[in-house]
Amino acid sequence: MRNKFKYLIVLLTFPVMLSSCLKAGLEDFPEWDVNDISNVYVEFRYNSNVQYWSEPIVAYKRLTVTQTIDKTNKTVAIAITVPAASGSFTTDIRNTVTQDKLIPYFDISTAASMQGTDGTANPGNISDLTKPLKYKVTAANGSSAIWTITVTSFTK
């Protein structure tokens, strides 16, 4: 009988805990209207020599990126340098790094979303950085801008 009483109390208080007491008087905040790129990263992914269930584990090497961001014109010019071989990023693997098989990813404005446009793959996918990349960055309020990423140099 005692367990049934505890069960009944839990059942009766559970809906109260899930409801909100605030119904009005909450301040309305504007939605974010910024659709900027604030940082660009580039990495190279490769099969490491570590096996998991007879399949190689994918490893990555972050490349060095120097960037110039122009928020007015919505452009980013980047210079990419491939770091020296170290660890599982051997000289042989380093020699396979090419500008047309790199993976860019970004820091963008709070609550914004981003997608590739005009034939550019979405961020985080293998991309051909031998040509300009175009991304649509959409702010939380729905305003969007097309950003162009251009590689100014690629040093190995």
Image (tube, rainbow, N blue to C red):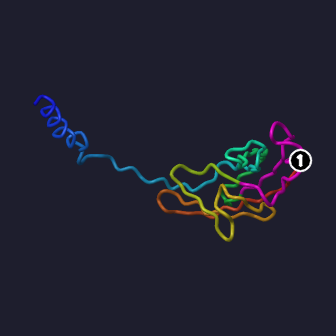
**Residue at 74% in and 49% down:** 43
- Per the picture, the main secondary structure of the magenta-coloured stretch is loop
Type of amino acid under label 1? Asp
Q: Is residue 20 left or right of residue 87?
A: left
Judge whether 117 appears above or below 3 on screen: below
Q: Is residue 25 left or right of residue 47?
A: left
The residue nearer to you, when weighing 29 against 114, is 114
Q: Quadrant of the N terminus?
A: top left
Q: Is residue 27 left or right of residue 45?
A: left
The residue nearer to you, when weighing 156 against 86, is 86
Judge whether 18 appears above or below 119 on screen: above
Q: Which residues make up the magenta segment?
A: 76-103
Q: Which residue is mark 1?
A: 92
Is 56 within the magenta? no
Image x and y of residue 52, in percent: 68, 44
Image x and y of residue 58, in percent: 71, 48
**Residue at 76% in and 64% down:** 132
User: Residue 15 lies in what quarter of the image?
Assistant: top left
Element type where label 1 sits in the image: helix
Q: Residues within 10 Å of mark 1 (few under 14, many from 20)?
A: few
User: Residue 3 lies in what quarter of the image?
Assistant: top left
Image x and y of residue 78, in percent: 78, 53
The residue nearer to you, when weighing 61 against 52, is 52
**Residue at 86% in and 42% down:** 90
Is 89 within the magenta? yes
